[in-house]
Image: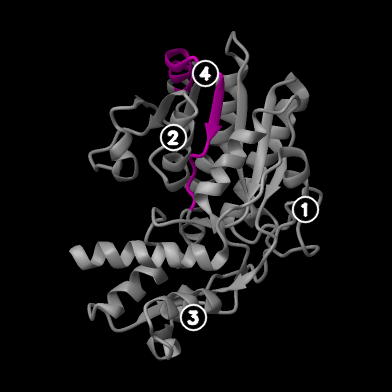
Amino acid sequence: MPRALVTGITGQDGSYLAEFLLDKGYDVYGLIRRSSVVTDQRIRHLIDRVELIDGDLLDQLSLIKAMRTARPDEVYNLAAQSFVPTSWGQPVLTGEFTALGVTKMLEAVRVADWPVRFYQASSSEMFGKVQEVPQTENTPFYPRSPYGVAKVYGHWITVNYRESYNLYACSGILFNHESPRRGLEFAPRKIARAVARIKLGKQMEIRLGNLDARRDWGFAGDYVRAMWMMLQQDAPDDYVIATGETHSVAEFCELAFRRVGIDNWRDYIVIDPALLRPAEVDLLIGDPTKAREKLGWQPEVSFEGLVNLMVDADLAMEAQS
């Protein structure tokens, strides 16, 4: 059976990827940081099917030990400090995990005495102040947050290790991807949960920042499939994974409220200046042509389908609580 090591397995993408790999017949190992706080909610239903290994992206020796324990054929590096607003408050920590952590994971792969294929989770936030529309694999990066800057480092160090050491190393430049498993601090999940609570009379308003910000939103379950497909090719390469559509935060709100039968959605929105970014990314839209033509990948869940999926899940959860 093929073996995979997933960092960030307790996150949104890690949980969907673990499910996908298990269905493909993989032995799945997950790297987790030891903590007194339970963080396995997203993979609790898989806990008897995956093997968890203690480790930390900042501790090189623990990564080498994890590699020796799992002896993976494939490594998926999904772990990072991934909430963009936090990166302004904790820029050094973001750089350590999201940038240098990639190098340490690549080093652990490099010193392995067996062939390993490596996937790095790059991000559309690297494009930031976009230099062209839509964004492709060749669009210059112009990050607008410490998170975006750190992701650029992680992306290029992956390319460098591929070219320097002939590693099979790929980067997936994933545009925004959401699901009912998304953290509550992220705007789409914050909106979905608030709409469910407003419908049930538990909440009266949603505090948001820039309603005009536009993103290319897809379903996380579709995007982890693309990660796996990248590592099944004859040669490593980098790919933009996106829907090719862009929608505003306001559109997300409108569809979410429409799902629960509320038309006057703006009456429930409060614009909070504290939620505006110091440097905003106004427009992101990816061109997934390369992924479609070379990988045979395309998203299956539409934007409206994604919004409905998230609202329905939070409505069901809030109704039970």
Depth check, front residue: 270 or 258: 258
Q: Residues within 10 Å of mark 4 (few under 14, many from 20)?
A: few
Check whether the beta carbons of the residues at disc 3 and disc 2 lie within 8 A of each other.
no
Q: Residues within 10 Å of mark 1 (few under 14, many from 20)?
A: many
Q: Earlier in the sequence, mark 3 or mark 2?
A: 2
> Which is more N-terminal, label 4 or label 1?
4
Q: Amino acid at mark 4?
A: Pro
Looking at the picture, which amino acid does disc 2 mark?
Answer: Ala
**Disc number placed over residue 136 in the picture, else none:** 1
Magenta residues? 63-82
Q: Is residue 112 left or right of residue 243?
A: left
Q: Position of residue 201 (x, y in %)?
A: 23, 81
Q: Which numbered tag is attached to residue 18?
A: 2
Q: Nearer the viewer, residue 320 or 217?
A: 320
Where does the image place residue 224, in percent across and percent down from the top left? 54, 42
What's the distance in space between the residues labelled 3 and 2, CA to CA?
33 Å
Compared to residue 106, the image places residue 88 above or below, namely below
Judged from this view, the residue extending furthest toward the top is 113
Q: Nearer the viewer, mark 1 or mark 4?
A: 4
Instruction: State the mark number for residue 2.
Output: 4
3D distance between C-alphas at marks 1 and 4:
32 Å
Q: Secondary structure at mark 4?
A: loop
